[in-house]
Image (cartoon, coloured by chain):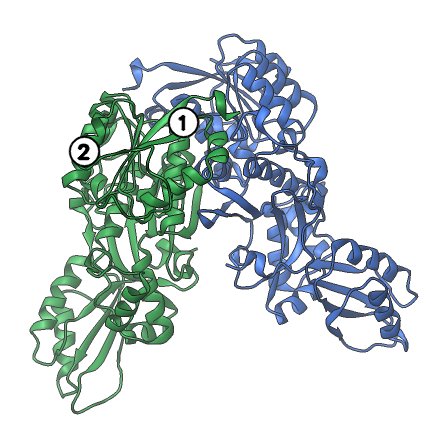
Chain colours: A green, B blue
C-alpha cells in the first residue's frame, strides 16, 4: 500500500516528553499510521535544545534546526509540529512563520493559543492551512474534536471539566490520606506528577488555558485568556475534605464556561454523585451540555507522553486525510468577542467558607456581623473543637451569594482580630453539575 | 454571513422521531447551523410513511417522495439523510441508489451498515462521496468520530461499551427495585423506553449492530455482524443482582471487541468500581483502550430524538466543511476480513452460574460431577435457602473457564433431574474493565 502514497513531510520542534514520543510513534508504527492516514509520514526536520541526547530514534536522515523558527523556511516541509511550549518566544515565532509560509501547524501549546489563538487562526485561514491543537486540551481525550465537530450541531450551554491532572492528583490524595497540601505537592514533584515550579499547575493557570480554548470553540468566540477568573488549589486544607465529605461533597478544581459569562477555573465543592466528582487521580474529564444532545462526559488521561502523542497523531492523520476546517470551528470573522462576557460570573451560588478563629467570646458575633453586612445568609455554621491556644476551624455553608460579596466578606474576615489565617471560600456547584 | 454561502441541498427519508427532529433542528436553528457549517442547508425533499402528519414544520416548499429510493434520482440533492431503518428493503435500496448517483449519504441505520457496510463503503469510494453514520452508534456520544479520527493514531486493543439504553434501563431498574424482568419490560414499554416487539433490544441484536461498527473502525476490518456472539438480558433474574452485589459486581449488557477475536455482546458481571459498571439508566458508554492513549471512556444519552439528531447534524456539518474520509477510517481495499477472528472468544474467564434446583439429597453431587466432567473448577458455591417444595437457587463462581465448556455444561445441567429451570451463566469481566 504505502509505497505509492504521497509523502507528507513533517518538522518537529521540541523533542521532550511529547515531541520525542510523537517521533518514536511515527517511526516505530509507520506502516499502521501510514495506512490509516493514506500518506507516508516522513520526519524531515527536528529541533530541540540539545542535539546529542539519545532519544531512541535515528536522526541522521533529518535536518537539524538550531533555532526553531528557522524550521518554517524549510520549503519541503508540509507540517510543523510544535512541542516547545510557552506563549511567547520561539514557539510564537515558529507558529507565525509556519502559518505565514502555508505550512499546517499542529501544537500541544495551550498557552500559545489561549493568548494568540485569534491571530494564529487568522493567519491559518489567510494561508489556507490547518491549525490543529487536540493535544493542547485534556491530553488523550479527543475533547477539541468532540466539541468542534462531534457536537457542532448543538447550542452549547456549558462546558466544564477537570483539566489539570496534577491538581486532581493532589486533591484526590489529600482527600484519601488526610495529608497537607505542601506534603502531597512535594511528593507529587518527586513522582514527576508536578513541576519543580508548580504554580502553573496548582494556581489553575494551565487548566485556565485549556478552558479558554474549550470556551472559544463551544460558544464561537475568540479565545481570551485574560478574562478567565482563576483560583487555584493552594488554600485547601485537609480538614476541608472532612467537612465536604460529611456534607456529601467532593473538592475538585473545576473549570466552567457558559455563554456570555466569564469562564471560571476554581476549586469547588461538587455533589459526590456528579460525574466530575467521581474523576480521581491524574485523570481529566470534560463535560458538555447543550441542545439537542443534552449532556456528554469524557474521561481519560490528561497528560503524559502516550496520551498527548495520541492527540498529535490524530491531528496529523486528519491533516493527511483532509479532515480539517477552521481552528475554532468557524472562521475568525464569525467569532464573537470572547471578552464580551456581559453576564459576569453567572447566578449566585451557595458557598463553603472556612475561617480559622481564636476560640474566644464574641467570635460568632463578629463573624455573623460581617456576613450580615455583606448580605450573605448562612444555612449552617459549625465550630469544630475547642482550644484555648490554637485557632479552630469555623465552617459555614451559605445560601446563594454572589462571588463579589463573598470575596469582599473574606477581606472583612481577614481584618477581624479573632481570625488567624487566610479565610477560604469555595462555591458549591449543586444542580449545575448533577450527573 | 449566510446569504452569500453555498447552498447544500438535503433530502430526508424517514420523518419519525429522529428524522423529524433533524428537520426541525435544521429549520429552527438555521442561522446558527449555517454559520457553523459554512453553507446554507436546505431541505429540498422529504419522504415518510404518511404525508399528512403534522410534524411541526412546513413541508410545502419540499418535494414529497412517495417511494424513498426515488429520492436518489432528484438531481439537485447533495446529501441524503436516511432515517427509515431496517437492514434491507427501501433503506438499502435508497443507500445504494444515493451513493451510486454520487450523493453523500448520512444514516442512523446500524442494521444496514452492520450487514452491508462493506458494499456501501465501496460504493461511496467509487463515487467520491461521504458515507457517515455517527447517529448509528451510541446516540449523542460522538463515538464513531472518536474512534475513526480522535484516536486514529492508536493501536486499539479493545473497544467495549454499554450500547443499548433499553437494556441498561431494565437492568438498572431490576437491580434497584428487585422487580422481575417481565414486569420492568412491560413498564418500559409503557414509558416508551422499549418497543412493543422488544427482542431487537433485549436479545442484544441492536447493541451487536453497534459493536460491529465500532469493531470495524477500531481494528480496520470489514463490518461483519454474522460473527458476533450475542446473548441478551432475558435470563437475568432479580436474585442475580442480589448475589452479584454481595460479591461486589454489577450486571450489565456489555459489548467487547478485541482484535482478532469474535466480538461479544453479553450480559456479564462487572466490578462495581469499573467505569462501565457505574453507567445507569438509559445512558450509553463507550470505552476505548489502545496504545499510546491508554484508555478513554465517554458517557451520554444513547438514544432519543435530541441526542441522535445531534449526531446527524454533526455529520451534515462535517460534510459541509469537507471533513470526511473513508467510512470505516481506511479505504475498503485496506480493511482486513472481519470474519478472520482466529482467536475465537479470547482467554478463559471466571463465570457466575445460577441453577434453580430441587432441594433434595444428591443435588450437589450431581452438579459438581457435571462441573468436573467439563473441567470447570469452582471458587465458591452457595445454595440459598431451603424448601421442600419450590426450587431454590444454587449460585457458583467458577475459576477461569472457556465459554465453550461453560455452555456445554449448561446443557448437561439442564438434563439433570434436580434442575428445574434454564440454567444461567454470565462471564465475570474482572481485570479487563477495571476503571
> Measured along the vertical axis of the image, is residue B413 above or below residue A383?
above
Q: Nearer the viewer, mark 2 or mark 1?
A: 2
The image quadrant of residue A97 is top left
In this picture, residue A190 sits left or right of residue B378 = left
**C-alpha distance separating marks 2 and 1:** 23 Å
Residue occupying the point 21% across, 25% down: A73
| Chain letter of disc 2 in the image | A
**Residue B370 picture location, percent across and down:** 86, 65
Q: Which residue is mark 2?
A: A69
On the question of residue A337 being in view, the answer is no
On the question of residue A315 being in view, the answer is yes
Identify the disc placed on residue A320: 1
Residue occupying the point 14% across, 80% down: A365
Q: Nearer the viewer, residue A395 or B363?
A: B363
> Measured along the vertical axis of the image, is residue B32 above or below residue B212?
above
* Mark 1 element type: helix
Residue occupying the point 43% across, 51% down: A299
In this picture, residue A79 sits left or right of residue B217 = left
Is disc 2 in the same subunit as disc 1?
Answer: yes
Amino acid at each position: 500500500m504505502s509505497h505509492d502514497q504521497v509523502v507528507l513531510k513533517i518538522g518537529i520542534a521540541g523533542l521532550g516528553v511529547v515531541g520525542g514520543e510523537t517521533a518514536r510513534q511515527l517511526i516505530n508504527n509507520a506502516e499502521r499510521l501510514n495506512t490509516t492516514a493514506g500518506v507516508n509520514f516522513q520526519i524531515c526536520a527536528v529541533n530541540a535544545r540539545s542535539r546529542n541526547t539519545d532519544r531512541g530514534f535515528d536522526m541522521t536522515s533529518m535536518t537539524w534546526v538550531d533555532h526553531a523558527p528557522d524550521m518554517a523556511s524549510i520549503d519541503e516541509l508540509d507540517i510543523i509540529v510544535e512541542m516547545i511550549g510557552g506563549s511567547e518566544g520561539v514557539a510564537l515565532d515558529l507558529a507565525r512563520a509556519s502559518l505565514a509560509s502555508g505550512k499546517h501547524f499542529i501544537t500541544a501549546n495551550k498557552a500559545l493559543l489561549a493568548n494568540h489563538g485569534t491571530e494564529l487562526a487568522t493567519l491559518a485561514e489567510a494561508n489556507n492551512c490547518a491549525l490543529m491543537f487536540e493535544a493542547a486540551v485534556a491530553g488523550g481525550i479527543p475533547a477539541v474534536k468532540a466539541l468542534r465537530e462531534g457536537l457542532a450541531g448543538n447550542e452549547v450551554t456549558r462546558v466544564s471539566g477537570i483539566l489539570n491532572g496534577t491538581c486532581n492528583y493532589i486533591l484526590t490524595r489529600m482527600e484519601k490520606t488526610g495529608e497537607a497540601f505542601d506534603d502531597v505537592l512535594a511528593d507529587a514533584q518527586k513522582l514527576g506528577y508536578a513541576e519543580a515550579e508548580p504554580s502553573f499547575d496548582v494556581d489553575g493557570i494551565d487548566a485556565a488555558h485549556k478552558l479558554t480554548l474549550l470556551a472559544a470553540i463551544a460558544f464561537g468566540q475568540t479565545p481570551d485568556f485574560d478574562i478567565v477568573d482563576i483560583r487555584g488549589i493552594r488554600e485547601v486544607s485537609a480538614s476541608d475534605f472532612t467537612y465536604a465529605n460529611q456534607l456529601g461533597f467532593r473538592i475538585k478544581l473545576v473549570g466552567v464556561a457558559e455563554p456570555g459569562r466569564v469562564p471560571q477555573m476554581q476549586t469547588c465543592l461538587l455533589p459526590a454523585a456528579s460525574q466530575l466528582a467521581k474523576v480521581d487521580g491524574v485523570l481529566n474529564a470534560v463535560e458538555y451540555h447543550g441542545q439537542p444532545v443534552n449532556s456528554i462526559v469524557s474521561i481519560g488521561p490528561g497528560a503524559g507522553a502516550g496520551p498527548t502523542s495520541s492527540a498529535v497523531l490524530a491531528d496529523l492523520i486528519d491533516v493527511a486525510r483532509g479532515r480539517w476546517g477552521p481552528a475554532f470551528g468557524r472562521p475568525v470573522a464569525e467569532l464573537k468577542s470572547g471578552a464580551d462576557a456581559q453576564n459576569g460570573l453567572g447566578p449566585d451560588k451557595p458557598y463553603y467558607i472556612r475561617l480559622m478563629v481564636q476560640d474566644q467570646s464574641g467570635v460568632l458575633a463578629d463573624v455573623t456581623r460581617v456576613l450580615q453586612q455583606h448580605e450573605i445568609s448562612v444555612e449552617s455554621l459549625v465550630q469544630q473543637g475547642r482550644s484555648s491556644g490554637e485557632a479552630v476551624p469555623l465552617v459555614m455553608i451559605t445560601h446563594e451569594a454572589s462571588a463579589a460579596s463573598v470575596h469582599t466578606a473574606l477581606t472583612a474576615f481577614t481584618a477581624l482580630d479573632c481570625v488567624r489565617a487566610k479565610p477560604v471560600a469555595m462555591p458549591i456547584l449543586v444542580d449545575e453539575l448533577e450527573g
